[in-house]
Image (spheres, rainbow, N blue to C red):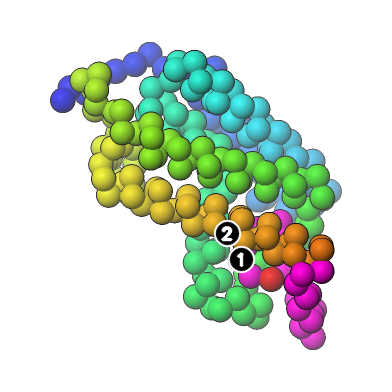
Amino acid sequence: MAVCTLSGNADMYGLGIRVGFYLQWFGKILATWVARKEVTGMRLSESLFIAATFLALIIQTSRDNLRPVEIYVILLLTFGGYLHFVPLYVWRLLIGCDPDLDPSRHPRVKPGKMFSRLNFSLLSTVCIFQLWFWIGKVSNIGRGGCTEFGFLFARIRLNQRGFVVVNVVLYFLLLLCCMAVLGISVGKRWGFLEEKPKRSIGYVLPKYDLLPCF
């Protein structure tokens, strides 16, 4: 197959938009240490930025204005801020959710309710869209005579079976974790589940982490 070129869509993933995402990711991390009062507003603005970009992605996709590789790039930008959950999920499962070994047990800035709910909704919705993209959309790659590539520690064909399976499993597990957290939260709110007693060391698991350990 031929490797084709495209002009790109500067309104969706142009240089300015990419730089904006990068600055928000690293700025939020740095602000938790040097400007805690600014973190709440930065988190909310980042979530709104992601929501706006994701809404535009859905509209453009419904109009069939984007190639799969363009959707892939935009999803990396919208989902990039959540990728730190992956090693954190794995680590907490490996340590059996032991709070003494949890690196995030003492969050420097607690999130507000609005951010937590918006963040949870975005994470769940993006996971669903990711599953649709990898299961349904990627299968159409190559029909126009072009090969499109992604990245997994090296350049790889976007529709290569192993690459597709890795992404489907990843986003399915993340969505499963979200649904488990939602189920547990609803169960506790309605009295179906009992709250676990607090540890004497004063550990409180950050609710915004959306993790499977309570």
Bounds of the magenta span? 191-213
104 sits to left or right of 60:
right
Viewport quadrant of the C terminus: bottom right
**Residue at left offset 68%, top offset 37%:** 46
Corner quadrant of residue 178: bottom right
Q: Is residue 183 above or below residue 167?
A: below
- The kind of residue tagged 1 is Pro
Is disc 1 surrounded by few (<14), some (14 to 19) or many (20+) residues within 10 Å?
A: some
The disc, 1 or 2, on the residue closer to the chain's N-terminal end is 2
Viewport quadrant of the N terminus: top left
Q: Is residue 195 above or below residue 173?
A: below
Which residue position is annotated with label 2?
Answer: 177
**Residue at left offset 81%, top offset 63%:** 189
**Residue at left offset 68%, top offset 60%:** 183
In the rendered image, residue 138 lying in the magenta stretch gets the answer no
**Label 1: which secondary element:** loop
Which residue position is annotated with label 1?
Answer: 212
Position in image of residue 130 (x %, y %): 48, 40
Position in image of residue 49 (x %, y %): 67, 31
